[in-house]
Image (cartoon, rainbow, N blue to C red):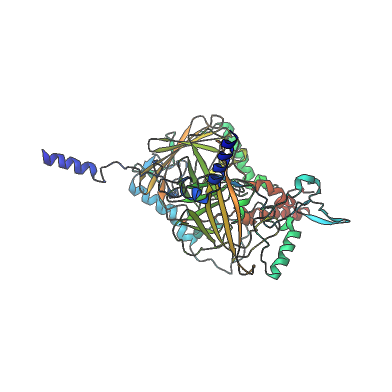
Amino acid sequence: MFISERLFLVVCFIFCTSHSFADNNNIPRLPNGKPDFNGVWQVLNTANYNIEPHAASSAMSLKDGPYGSLPSDEVVSLGAVGSIPAGVGVTDKIPYQEWALRKREENKNNWLDRDPEIKCYLPGTPRATYMPFPFQIIQSEQAFFFAYEYAGATRNVFLSDPGPAPIDSWMGQSYGQWEGDTFVIEVTGNNDQTWFDRSGNFHSDALHVEERYTYKHPNLIRYEATITDEKVFTRPWKMSMNIYRRQAEDAQILQFKCVEFVEELIYGHLRRNHE
Amino acid sequence: MNRLLLLLILLYTHPAYAEYKTPETIFDQPDLQGIWSNATITPLERPYNAKESSISKHDAQAWEQQANAYISISEQPIDPDAPAPKTADPAKGYESFWVDRGTNLAIVNGAIRTSLISYPSNGKIPYRSSAQSKLQIFLSRFISGFDHPEQRSPGERCIVGYGSSGGPPMLPVLYNNHIQIIQNKDHVLIHVEMNHDARIIRLNAPHTPLPAWLGNSIGIWEDETLVVTTKHFAKGQDCRASMTHWFCMSENATVTERFTRISDSQILYEFEIDDPESFSDVWKGEIPLNAAEGPIYEYACHEGNYGMKNILSGARQQEAELKQ
């Protein structure tokens, strides 16, 4: 009995960790044979706080204290709810140009004023992927579409070459192609208004993102994004993470139209009889 | 005898006589996918000078010429040295470059329609007086409510598209009348260009009883027709419009939509509104969705909503000046 259990575990380990198993045989496929990414997906990481490795800390917005940083006056009442969980990071140290690293620190120190997420602005790519909200892929033989719960953001992926993006946009222009069982999306035409996370990591309008979606398991996608932006970074760099399928029978993305939630923040001072 | 049989076969298989066969997706379901537009100059309600539900081609041409006359007027060059107008003129808010409301009346089953409403037969919304009162309050606030952002319409607030573009019912508005439909086995997604609203319609599933902007939609296939039922509307979206026609529904309304592909280039979109709190009868409409060239562009409304700041700060400035 004991031996049988151990044998079972060994067999299970081999099958569950075998890339070729996932790549070839056991992943969902559309009737046309392409990998089927339809589903509700979500990451389980802290990348939206900081894509670089980071220890836990008391708050995103800090001020100097007698023994180190303290939560700033604007967020101190949040207590533990406003503190930051640690994360091993989804990338190594980002290769910023010197000026850009200073700007990242400025951004971080002015998080409340500058992070576009606080104003419910569209998250851009790749940040939409690892926001702490699920997203849904609707895929057919002729379309590939991302619907993100956060801010109701959307992204339609062109499956034939659309040519250069006609204008920069928040979510960019996406062009997807298959490389074997990996779906590769080139995201161009990005504006310079979105961030990578809450820690001030940023880019310019020269941002080019190559995303790669590869099944590692029927309910697990390995996601890689290669970031190129010669105005901000010294070289291309890559982030990678797992994306998990929401498997509940009633899995669905709900509505998080946060625009109405930030009206007081953005327009409150313009109310009649505002105190 | 053989010649007669051959003739019957030819007639049956000729495109002009054969009933349209809807193509299927790889999931063996009727294929509605593509980019479509519901732009039309047919109004939601029948105008008082239109007696019937449809008109002749001759009368339609006259109607279309008159309706489109504004395009040539607004395309006149603007005098760059002209002073600012002394009074607000809403008609000057948009020149034709920014307008894409269509140039033709809607044609449904070969009839050129004078209203999008097909029932009641008079082409009018069967308001209850309570709904009319609600509408008057809304319109009064719309015209002169500048105290708080919540007094502005959901479209101005960039929560949903203007009018009832995302619906349901999805009705034509001044511009951005495009939708993209994508299907998989269990869902139909309608991507509404105005305000990047993605209506994710779950097939053969129960409603999720949470109030939501655009409501909660589920769908079933009835032969080749997609039937979508929507309930649980957010309270703030109760009053909507299609061009100049406004109406208010309650959050308890049920909207049923039917999508039937009738040719390679057209979907017949039917809707029915059942809301006894607001209307004395159900009311129904029919709108052709015409195949449109893509792509759909990003409609990042909130991110560039200078209008809301200007509206509120302008009102506060006026108040300050009156106090002096």
What residue is rendered at 67% in x and 48% in y? B149
| Quadrant for the C terminus of chain B in the image | bottom right
Residue A122, placed above or below residue B32: below
Q: Residue at x 80, y 45 (%)?
A: A79
| Residue, far right | A66
Would residue A102 be found to the left or right of residue A164 on screen?
right
Residue A96 in percent (x, y) is at 67, 67
Q: Position of residue B287 (x, y in %)?
A: 43, 43
Q: Residue at x 78, y 45 (%)?
A: A80
> What count of labels does the image hold?
0
Give whichever of B156, B142 is nearer the camera: B156
Q: Residue furthest left?
A: B1
Q: Quadrant of the N terminus of chain B?
A: top left
Residue under the image location 58 percent in, 50 percent down: A153
Can residue B204 be seen from the camera position used here? Answer: yes
Q: Residue B134 occupies which quadrant of the picture?
A: top right
Query: Residue B297, position in %: x, y?
Result: 51, 56
Q: Nearer the viewer, residue B117 or B275?
A: B275
**Left or right of residue B222, residue B206 in this image:** right
* Towards the viewer: A215 or B126: A215
Residue B281 lies, with reference to residue A104, above or below; the image says: above
Q: Is residue B324 visible?
A: no
Q: Relative to B15, is B317 on the left or the right?
A: right
Percent position of residue A120, x then y: 65, 51
